[in-house]
Amino acid sequence: MRILFLTHAFNSLTQRLFVELTRLGHEVSVEFDINRSVTIEAVGLFRPHLILAPYLRRAIPEAIWRNHLCLVLHPGIVGDRGPSALDWAILKSVQTWGVTLLQAEAEMDAGPVWASETFPMRAAKKTSLYRNEVTEAAVRVVNTALERLPDYRAGKWRPQALPPRPMHALMQQTDRAIDWTRDTTDRVMAKLNASDGFPGVKDELFGHPCHLFNARPFPARGTPGEVLGRNGEGVVRATVDGAVRIGHVKRAGGIKLPVTSAFKEVEALVELDADADPDIRYEEVNGVGYLHFDFYNGAMGTGACRRLLAAYEVARQRPTRVIVLMGGPDFFSNGLDLNRIEAAYSPADESWYNIEAMDDLCQAVIETTTHYTVAALQGNAGAGGAFLALAADCVWARKGVILNPHYKNMGNLYGSEYWTYLLPKRVGEEAARRIMARRLPLGALEAEDIGFIEACFGDTVASFQAEVRRRAAALADTPGLLAYLAEKRAKRATEEATKPLAQYRAEELAHMKRNFYGFDPSYHVARYHFVNKTPHSWTPRHLAKHRELGWVVPGDGEW
């Protein structure tokens, strides 16, 4: 079928559905919901068999839903109506939540139900629930709807009509507000989790208004509301029965940054738990070293890369045979920290420092010949983070992982992280050029098919983690592992003699230098709009295939 995605943005859920439906053989095109006339034009150009709205912030125009089948994904259980659905579910501490696929009609979220799924709620950030439970449920309900579509067309099945129910309101900052003198740690965390990603919780630090993000409980006590000290790049603030660590803030008129970058006052605070890095953790089990790194939104700034490199160097000294790079449960890595770069005195200089630090980390992994290295992608990876994974000997990914192994969407950025060495080795020169040029997400199953990764398994983060441990332990016990490592050393020496890694790096960085310091400001403009969440003015052409020059609607045929 021709399926048109009508969406506010090409977010993680929309990308996952794009990948899934494309893999099933459907022709999918995307149109951002910019205004009514643009949307109507897109429908006329593409002539879709189905319009799917995976992420909308306003109703579909009547001129469209009256003449086309439009299915809207709502991140709530059957009967839930209105905005802030997941926010309210977290704030109310519901035990079970879900996703509902509704047919668009005059009333918002009131159309007949095509499919629904439920799932148990975790105590987690809204963004984490959205990327995992909500996304997996969304894939299932869309697949169910597609299976029912032929019977619907033939008049053999009808969606379930909903009884009239009131619509809940958009959650306001008054609903999210923390009462530091009364709220328990659990209550504070519920408010912060319900607001993470967007819009954050409006509060203040050091007498300045700001929005709070990226919180976790912290083992400390003090006067409720008091800032007890700093921990890594965050601050610890007391609740009535404990404390929370706040990692990121957004000051009025600013962008989201680590607390230490947003407030100079943090420098005077005492460091709490100075011996532990809040973002990096190492463990050894059954002769395998597991390096966990869970950076907020997968962004790895200069300091994060250097800290992770130091931790990796320690892991290389351990008497193990296998090192597994685990990343975090939501993201493996998304490469450069664009927010930090945007906030720097010289964004060009900070971009350069950041890419050099990423390259140093990738180089260390590539040059590791004492251990077998595995990149285990529990969560999504993009840009340089995807190539950090390819630096390992072997890459495993959870089935639902989405990869964006390209850079061009960020102002035609060229990219480094030794991608010109790593990518062609795995998929070949032609496929490498295609991946880097097409700028589209790559699903884990397709990545396995083309050799980008070695294996894809695990329906959930928990099942993936368990299987990673089983496979890694088996690797460490493999009798031929020492022989493999000897062969690896010889191969690396041959490749280095043919073309040194330093040459790949120098060639890539020559392009990056032009991106950062050259006459064309595209990278800096794209970064500014990305960091500041500038509303889209048009749909990128690589997504809106119906707007390509020469686009002709194929013959409808059977579908």
Image (spheres, rainbow, N blue to C red):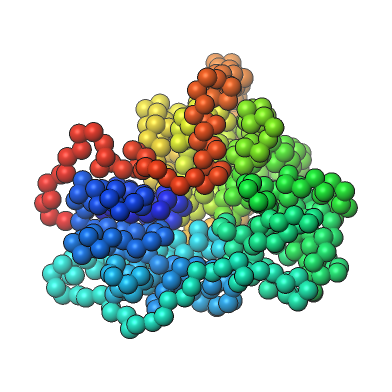
Q: How many marks?
A: 0
Q: Position of residue 386 (x, y in %)?
A: 53, 40
Q: Residue drawn 12% across and 55% down?
A: 558
Q: Position of residue 318 (x, y in %)?
A: 76, 42
* Extreme residue in the bottom direction: 163
Q: Is residue 224 above or below residue 322?
A: below
Q: Position of residue 505 (x, y in %)?
A: 59, 22
Q: Is residue 195 visible?
A: yes
Q: Is residue 504 visible?
A: no
Snapshot quadrant of residue 138: bottom left
Snapshot quadrant of residue 461: bottom right
Q: Residue drawn 75% across and 54% down?
A: 208
Q: Residue drawn 76% across and 70% down?
A: 180
Query: Toward the viewer: 483 or 2?
Result: 2
Q: Residue drawn 41% across and 74% down?
A: 81
Query: Toward the viewer: 385 or 191?
Result: 191
Q: Position of residue 413 (x, y in %)?
A: 50, 29
From the viewer's perspective, tell me whether residue 140 is left or right of residue 329.
left
Query: Toward the viewer: 357 or 444?
Result: 357
Q: Is residue 113 above or below residue 465?
A: below
Query: Toward the viewer: 91 or 407?
Result: 91
